[in-house]
Image: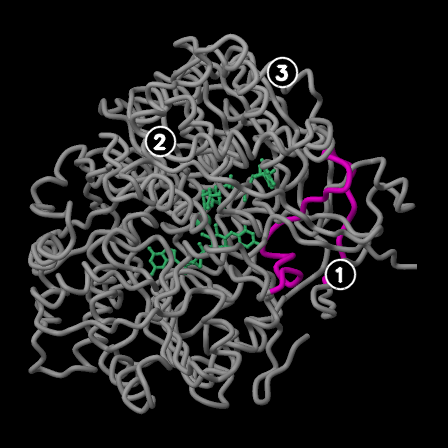
Amino acid sequence: MEENKKRKISVEGDLEFTGLKVTKPADTAAGFTGVKVAMEHGMKEMGIVKAFSTLLHMNQKDGFDCPGCAWPDPEEPSKVAEYCENGAKALAEEATNKRVDPDFFKKHSVEELSLWSDYRIGKSGRLTHPMVLRPGEVNYEPISWEGAFDLIADHLRYLSTPDEAVFYTSGRSSNEAAFLYGLFVRAFGTNNMPDCSNMCHESSGAALGETLGIGKGSVKLEDIHEAEVILVMGQNPGTNHPRMLLALEKCKKNGGKVISINPLKEPGLVRFKNPQEIKGLLLDGTPIADIHLPVKINQDVPLMKLILKKLAALDREKGKVFDHDFIKKYVAGYVPLMQDLEKYDETDLLERCGVSETLIDQVVSLLAVKKKIIICWAMGLTQHKNGVENIKECVNLLLLKGSLGKPGAGTCPVRGHSNVQGDRSVGIMHHVSPRLNKAIEAVFGFSPPDKEGLDTVHAIKAMHDKKAKVFIALGGNFLSAASDTRYTAEALQNCDLTVQISTKLNRSHLVTGKTALILPTLGRSEKDLKDGEQRFLTVENSMGKVHRTKGLLPPASDNLKSEPEIVTGIAHAYFGEDHQVPWLEMGYDYELTRGKLGEVVKGFEGLGKRSEGSGYYLPNNVRTLDFSKLPEGKAQLSICGLPEHDLAEDELLMMTIRSHDQFNTTIYGLHDRYRGIYNERRVILMNEEDMRSHQLQKEEVVNLSSTYDGVVRKAEKFIVVPYDIPRGNIASYFPETNVLVPYNHFADKSNTPISKSVKVRIHKIS
Ligand SMILES: Nc1nc2c(c(=O)[nH]1)N[C@H]1C(S)=C(S)[C@@H](COP(=O)(O)OP(=O)(O)OC[C@H]3O[C@@H](n4cnc5c(=O)[nH]c(N)nc54)[C@H](O)[C@@H]3O)O[C@H]1N2
Ligand SMILES: Nc1nc2c(c(=O)[nH]1)N[C@H]1C(S)=C(S)[C@@H](COP(=O)(O)OP(=O)(O)OC[C@H]3O[C@@H](n4cnc5c(=O)[nH]c(N)nc54)[C@H](O)[C@@H]3O)O[C@H]1N2
Ligand SMILES: [Mo]
């Protein structure tokens, strides 16, 4: 247990085992069990009537956007609810009937709550009142909204520079709330806007921006249906984007091929039973991945290089493998890339990636003759030291094949949070955008700061060094999501004030600054009423489409405010009545905010009207093959090096992944059904031969450590589970193993923590 000076707070909570049961991994995703589990979660949290009626409105055009992932809705309105098992769980968490009210906080001190597991904390229910934890106290007490806003404004006022404050955003906020938040932070005078994207798809943004001129993907949902080949790399859609399986199923029915590249043979990619079709529930389901390449952790670059080398050889031999017309017209860097590929030895590349050459040759033969290729990817590519280069290597393949700017082809970074992409589009960003600053100045009459702000990893360091003293979070669970949990805890505890704008209780409400505030907010699924009128908000999905979201449930408490109201409440308390930005009106009148957003950010003009129905696509230069903003006016091929880990003999490379029963730090349940792991999260998945060489028995309890720059970090009590995973690799669940991820090791250029390639040692407990 970690302690701070005044409060005895446990950073990790309850480490007790919950009763592991292991079965064979599933060979099919979704189907009846998926529907059953979804309904069970719904009924447990909401009751039967509420569960049924709410699920029917999710992802419908007049309904609300699923609070789960960012996968887009189909163009054709679905007759039944477009939901999935894990979307239903996300909804059940938000729409739960349980409440964390002032009595709850009177009964349970933060010291006591911190001893609970994350699972138990999350299951406590919805936050109902603004609460304050005063210096030295261990119980939160109620505070009025005005009192809370004034307290924040007072703390912000006494800082010696605005750069002493940090404003975090998680990706569930609406475009309107995020725009107002970014505007306030800039008016206050800093660009310290770390966001969850820094830990997530920042590597994708950096790589795509440099190579294609836009930090977003290029494909639309229909492209997935039309593709000839889809590579799914470093992504587990069966769990994290289940509705993507519907799209992959369509692609397969149209004759497309799916290739999965992943150290694990994730069941969702093996076979899928469509839960929205009766025959899907009854029959065997559709096989999804035609070829599975079990790449070793972080060896995607060697694998892609080998594939490119083989394709280049075929192209020289037979021609027409690469799209030379496309390359001539749109692409820069062809000759240097071909020369660089010459340098690599095929046997060495093969050994590094650990995949059989026969399988690779199958993939090469397929890619050689196909033109409509899509690459989908997620955290398995982004959260490594070379995360940016992983993605650049994917772009190389697409550019050489001319697989961009045409139907059925392109880039598809599959986003995480349901509006993480929109938040970025409307200005949540620690980088300085001169264009955005100029537009804000023209519309609002103040000039935003032009000094680069802090991203997540640098914000943690600044708080740890006491250079930042106030931390405000618009959603999320910064403590548990960020790397190096104990270091991050010290960083937050060093702050004078930490503020969490949240729907549900989490560990970031317990590991706090000297003073802490909880500001409870409306969730996606809830009615946002003003003077009897229901307001709507807008979001952007993973494919750049902006649309409305409008809740239908009564709010969890009468004391909740919407996110735009909270953000503008803080701004108003800080700036007072006479500021040039009409804060309170903008927090009240979302249409006014949308109008201003449209004046400031290109693509958001006429947002209120255009977001009607199924919404509209934001501009995307890759779709029109306009690379005019890039050097030579062309898309850029990249030369990437090979990843090196310098593992000591007894070190293994660990990836920290999601189970089937969690949404990031929110633990829905204790099962990872598809992987056959039940009722326990403190496990490591390990190759049986590695177990033998480490003299480990099945289900033996071990400790873990990681060593970086001479600093040893420890994580205690994990159960070893034999699993089909490449040798030298292990997998564990996040956030339990975040204590091992060093805060100061992150991806080049994107600064994303290396959560998928942590060097660890396993220690026997004798
Ligand atoms: N139900 C549910 N849905 C979610 C979330 C959730 O927690 N729960 N989280 C949301 C968020 S914020 C995000 S970002 C996404 C995350 O979606 P994913 O990226 O699918 O999530 P992870 O569990 O981190 O899975 C990473 C996958 O990459 C593989 N992998 C790990 N390392 C490597 C590697 O080096 N190379 C390759 N090729 N593969 C590798 C792992 O085996 C695993 O299958 O999902 C979103 N949707
Ligand atoms: N080791 C390791 N670490 C990781 C990752 C990993 O794969 N491995 N993944 C990283 C990734 S991809 C991400 S995106 C981050 C996630 O980082 P975060 O986004 O910070 O974390 P979440 O767990 O999604 O946040 C959950 C909390 O958000 C609040 N919340 C939910 N809905 C709303 C809402 O509508 N409004 C508001 N205001 N609050 C709401 C609730 O209080 C809930 O407890 O974690 C990262 N950390
Ligand atoms: Mo994410």
Disc 3 marks a residue whose amino acid type is: Asp
| Residue bounds of the magenta highlight | 715-742
Q: In the figure, is residue 195 to the left or right of 682?
A: left
Asked whether residue 205 is drawn in magenta, I would say: no
Q: Amino acid at mark 2?
A: Val
- Between label 1 and label 2, give the one nearer the viewer: 2
Label of residue 331 in the image: 2
Residue 726 shown in magenta: yes
| Residue 620 image-quadrant placement | top left
Secondary structure beneath label 2: strand
Instruction: Mark 1 and ligand 2: say if the CB distance to the nearest ligand atom is below 8 Å.
Output: no
Q: Residue at point 41% right, 32% down?
A: 84
SS at mark 3 in the image: helix
Q: Quadrant of the N terminus?
A: bottom right
Residue 701 x %, y %: 82, 52
Which callout, 1 or 2, points at the residue further toward the start of the chain? Answer: 2
| Image quadrant containing the C terminus | bottom right
The answer to whether residue 39 of the structure is visible from this angle is no
Which SS class for mark 1? strand
Q: Which colouring convention does the figure follow?
A: one colour
Side of 279 where 180 appears, left or right: left
Type of amino acid under label 1? Ser
Q: CA distance from mark 1 to mark 2?
A: 45 Å
Residue picked out by circle 3: 361
Of the numbered discs in the image, which one, if any, rests on residue 297? none
Viewer-side residue, 419 vs 54: 419
